[in-house]
Amino acid sequence: MNKLAAQPVVVIPNLNGGDELLEAIKSLVGQTVQPYIIVVDNASTDLSANRVAEQYPDVEIIRNSKNLGYAGGVNPGFKRAFELGAKYVAPFNDDAVADKDWLEKLVACLENNPAVGVAAAKVVTADKERLDSTGDYYTVWGLPYPRGRREYDLTKYDKQTDIFAASGAASLYRVKALKEVGLLDQAFFAYYEDVDLSFRLQLAGWKVAYVPDSVVYHYIGMTSGRVKGFTTYQTMKNLPLLWFKNVPRKYLWATGWRLFLAQTMFFGRAVQRGNGWPALKGAAMAAWLLTKKVPERKQIQNSKKVTDEYIWDMIVHDLPPNAHALRALRNKWWKLTRRKHG
């Protein structure tokens, strides 16, 4: 048996991570359960991968010839974990820092709960003042959201529980589950690929657990904020992709018309903010990708092991907390319909 098989593998996708990447690795080297660390470098130009090689020679480095996004920066590490015979593998952001028992708590959850396919940590902002994520959720509007984001009460979600999706920032996956449902979808490039993977795990009958005692600290949006229009393009592209691949046929219409309305409003606001072109390109790319994803959707839906009603019950039947414009529009509609029928 490979001597590394007993070690959890941690995969860090890196794009010009600089000092933050070294801090991330430092926090992993100090874990109470020592991982095998892999850095997948997305063609960085800041020589950060070279600095890792110099300061942490035991860290394995995989170099991509170009930037393949978050999914393309994680998948080569996942595949390497498979080769090493690892039982568990975790993606870890290059701008995150883990508590010393972060990994130990997640391993314990998977060891004690064989039905759990992925265990998610509590993600706190780097200044340790607010929550970033305590598990991701998917709504009937086709919009995912991280529970607790920007809330100041760090102890509000301190009960271990099943959630809908695990954040890609620092969650631990069971390799057996990944081999069943596949890796991150590189068509997403960045944003929502982690929700897509958890959605596929849910459809395959795996549970997703939130482990509040496992904590990491994250610099939110450090990479995406550098490129104008990046978030707009990826959001317009990826939300329809996430919806189309995973939502059972029985509920496609109920979620689809809501998502269309949300996307229309997103597009309008993008134009107002000078991001009309990225929004248009994202919508066009989404339309093209949906035609390519038909066989994949069929495979996902035909192999699901849970009922449509189970998924419907797991979905949040409301708007995300931060969807203020949509919530205002919905409230106006409700008042109008009550006036007509009341």
Image (cartoon, rainbow, N blue to C red):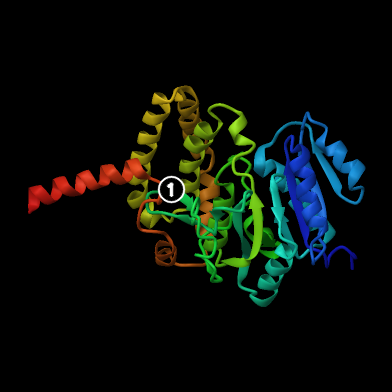
Please determine whether, in this image, residue 21 is positioned above or below residue 45: below
Quadrant holding the N terminus: bottom right
Task: Inspect this view and state whether residue 298 appears.
Answer: yes
**Residue 292, above or below 176:** above
Location of residue 189 by image quarter: top right
Residue 325: image location, x then y, percent: 33, 40
Q: Mark 1 — residue?
A: 143
Q: Position of residue 118 (x, y in %)?
A: 63, 63
Front residue of this view, candidates 268 and 200: 268
Give the left or right position of residue 15, taking residue 263 as reference. Answer: right
**Residue 171 location, x and y as percent?**
65, 58
Query: Could you tell me how many numbered marks the image carries?
Result: 1
At x 45% / y 26%, what residue is drawn? 280
Name the residue nearer the viewer: 173 or 214: 214
Left or right: residue 253 compared with residue 332: right
Q: Image point 76% across, 65% down: which residue? A: 87
Q: Is residue 171 visible?
A: no
Dot 1 lies on which element? loop
Residue type of the residue flagged with mark 1 = Leu
On screen, residue 184 versus residue 38, left or right, reads left
Instruction: Check the picture and name the quadrant holding the C terminus.
Output: bottom left
Q: For the point 16% across and 48% down, which residue is it? A: 335
Is 264 placed left or right of 196 in the picture?
left
Q: Up-down: is 233 above or below 85? A: above
